[in-house]
Image: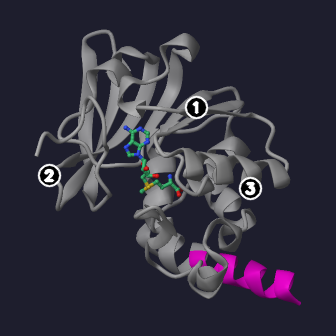
Amino acid sequence: MIADSTRSARRRMVRRQLLARGVDDRRVLAAMATIPRHLFVPPSLAGAAYDDAPLPVGEAQTISQPFMVALMTVAVQPRRTHSVLEIGTGSGYQTAILAHLVRRVYTIERLPALAESARGRLASLGYDNVEYHVGDGSLGWPETAPFDGILVTAAAPLIPGPLIDQLAPGGRIAVPVGDRALQELIVGVSGPSGLATYRAGACRFVPLIGAHAFSY
Ligand code: SAM
């Protein structure tokens, strides 16, 4: 009964929030129709888990709006063979979507309590292709680079240089770039003449904290 009602809430989310806004990557849509987002929010907010909004997950952090998760995931064009780096594990929801779609996910979170609960949540859901690290994700994870995709799920003033350096040839990066109040999702593709970027829409994320973050 409960499983049925969350399944229909997920399908409704996919139809009304993703398909209706032009998300058309079948694998991403299927992942979002499968992964139980209500298990990634505090129990008191489970009833709002499929709403068209970000939600608080503790430690003054948020789980991103479903559409933004879809947009960022599509931006890195995930393939089964890919190795992807995520900065900002948070609840682990975006991590789970990626783990569903690619070979291996490396995820970095600066807050140990969030990293620990995300690790437990993903393990209990059976994801065994995720590596976790607690630290400053703006420095990347050089030991496990290069990455086919990099997602930064916190706002930065610029695309952090170390992350560009850790992209594989042809690799794609998605970063909310702007000021503390408002950003634009910038997508970059690593090519022979450097990183070619394009804008993928306005967004609002919590700030990245670390070496390549806002100085104000
Ligand atoms: N991807 C998450 C999810 O699906 O729940 C949402 C992430 S939340 C919008 C942003 C996260 O980035 C927070 O958990 C925050 O602690 C983390 N963060 C901020 N600065 C960071 C840094 N320099 N390195 C790693 N994580 C960072």
In this orientation, does residue 96 appear? no
In the image, the residue with mark 3 has its CB under 8 Å from the nearest atom of ligand 1: no
Q: Which numbered marker is on residue 156?
A: none
Element carrying mark 2: loop
**Residue sticking out furthest to the right:** 1
What residue is shown at x 52% (from left), y 15% (from top)? 145
Q: Position of residue 134 (x, y in %)?
A: 54, 34
Badge 2 vs badge 1, beta-carbon distance below 8 Å: no
**Disc 3: CA contacts within 10 A as few (<14), some (14-19) or many (>=20):** some
Residue at image location 26% in from the left, 15% down from the top = 194
Q: Earlier in the sequence, mark 2 or mark 1?
A: 1
- Residue 48 place in picture, x, y as percent: 56, 84
Identify the residue under disc 3: 121
Q: Position of residue 193 (x, y in %)?
A: 25, 11
Secondary structure beneath disc 1? strand
Give the left or right position of residue 19, taking residue 118 as reference. Answer: left
Going by the numbered disc 3, the residue's amino acid type is Arg
Magenta residues, start to end:
1-13
Mark 1 Cβ inside 8 Å of ligand 1: no
Q: Is residue 111 above or below residue 138?
A: below
Amino acid, disc 1: His
- Residue nearer the viewer, 206 or 188: 206
| Label 1 crowd (10 A; few <14 / some 14-19 / many >=20) | some
Mark 1 — residue?
A: 133
Mark 2, residue position:
179
Residue at 85%, 48% in the rendered image: 126
